[in-house]
Image: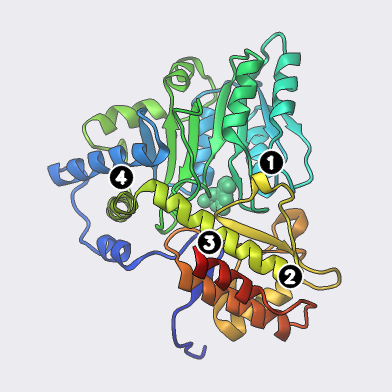
Amino acid sequence: MDYTSGRHFLQIPGPTNVPERVLRAMAKPTIDHRGPEFSRMAKEVLEGLKKVCQTASPVVIYPSSGTGAWEAALVNTLSPGDRILMFETGHFATMWRNLAIRIGLEVDYVPGDWRRGVDPAVVERKLTEDRQHTIKAVAIVHNETSTGVTSRVAGVRQAIDRASHPALFMVDTISSLASIDYRHDEWGVDVTVGCSQKGLMLPPGMGFNAISPKALAAAKSARLPKSYWEWEAMLNANKSGFFPYTPPTNLLYGLQESLQMLLEEGLPKVFARHDRLAEATRRAVRAWGLELVCQNPEEYSSSLTAVWMPAGHDADAFRKVILERFNMSLGNGLGKVQGKVFRIGHLGDFNDLMLAGTLSGLEMGLGLAGVPYKKGGVMAALEYLGQK
Ligand SMILES: Cc1ncc(COP(=O)(O)O)c(C=O)c1O
């Protein structure tokens, strides 16, 4: 392999760029995970994660990817054969649905076209029709990473309340946590599912569950088999700053640093930064004459932008040109939009000039790959960024 000079542009929607401060924090020697220094650090990060989830309830940390945190949410609260309401908003919603089926749940899966978020009116209708309360949980993906479409979590909560339905409410915030405003307590979420490698600016390797009192109560009678994922053992150990098994110590050092960085910037500013970079990206895409996957402006994602390739052009061939020529990775189309869509990640440790470089690579790449487009996307984004 030839050496490529300069920095790689990691513009996939997670894992995201890991900042120097976090890399340095993780390079410290691993300590005794049963000693007092570890306990102090674990208590600090468990408190800090609550701030990021905007909750007073406990948050647990698993040495796992996001998929583990999905499974933990379900196995701790539900029993074999329980019905769960889910929505086909994209590839990740489908993966969570598949997991739910594999562990023995009965999924009521509302079909979707991958261009819109969850419709609160459908939630209300489904729950109102369920007079016997056989639906035990509603589970949605806040930010669908495969499409760049967000769902209105507060609106779904209101729909559940309008139907006066007791179902638990679970939300996957894997690509929205610490990037897009998300409020576990205010929005009445029972289980929040998160992970480390996106807005938290960490490498992959940690999954999170924020757990409401109602979810904790449900866990007492939930009968799906579990051991590694069991909340009770984790919460008991966490009280004194420990884990029931060996924790990912060096990732926790990284989390301590990234939480510090997020709180130094302030969550409102973090969200505003993501909103602004996302808007600049959409302006570039429109100026190129390309089409966004997301159809409803109310549901635009501030973490990533997914774009349709013009008919007859392969998104993966385009991504290959950009990787080879400009050392930049873009997200591929997943599942049924493979080859048809590419995704621009603009979340995590990211700023105006990094976006300017990203969009420049894209505009040059469109020309090199022979994709029909109009010039001026970069300029449209820069005009927006330069103004505000
Ligand atoms: C919204 C969403 N949910 C779940 C997952 C699965 O997480 P992981 O690949 O870390 O298991 C991802 C991964 O990108 C995701 O974007």
Does the beta carbon of the residue at mark 2 sit less than 8 Å from ligand 1?
A: no
Indicate which label's residue lies in the foreground, 3 or 4.
3
Indicate which label's residue lies in the foreground, 1 or 3.
3
3 and 4 marks in contact (CB < 8 Å): no
Residue underneath mark 2 = 315
Q: Nearer the viewer, residue 194 or 367?
A: 367
Indicate which label's residue lies in the foreground, 2 or 1.
1
In percent of the image, x 32 and y 51: which residue is there?
A: 255
Indicate which label's residue lies in the foreground, 4 or 1.
1
Residue underneath mark 3 = 277
Residue 276 percent location from the top left of the image: 52, 58
In percent of the image, x 60 and y 86: which residue is there?
A: 325
Dot 2, how many residues are within 10 Å of its Cα: few (below 14), some (14-19), or many (20+)? many
Dot 3, how many residues are within 10 Å of its Cα: few (below 14), some (14-19), or many (20+)? many
Give the distance between the C-alpha atoms of the residues marked 3 and 2, in whole angstroms.
22 Å
Q: How many marks?
A: 4
Give the distance between the C-alpha atoms of the residues marked 2 and 4, in whole angstroms.
42 Å
Residue underneath mark 4 = 246
Q: Is residue 370 above or below residue 64?
A: below
Give the distance between the C-alpha atoms of the residues marked 1 and 3, in whole angstroms.
21 Å
Sequence-wise, which precedes: disc 3 or disc 2? Answer: 3
Q: Is residue 195 above or below residue 70?
A: below
Q: Residue furthest right?
A: 312
Sequence-wise, which precedes: disc 2 or disc 4? Answer: 4
3 and 2 marks in contact (CB < 8 Å): no
Q: Residue furthest bottom?
A: 2
Q: Is residue 291 left or right of residue 105?
A: right
Residue 117's disc is 1
In percent of the image, x 50 and y 58: which residue is there?
A: 347
Disc 4 marks which amino acid?
Answer: Thr
Dot 4, how many residues are within 10 Å of its Cα: few (below 14), some (14-19), or many (20+)? few
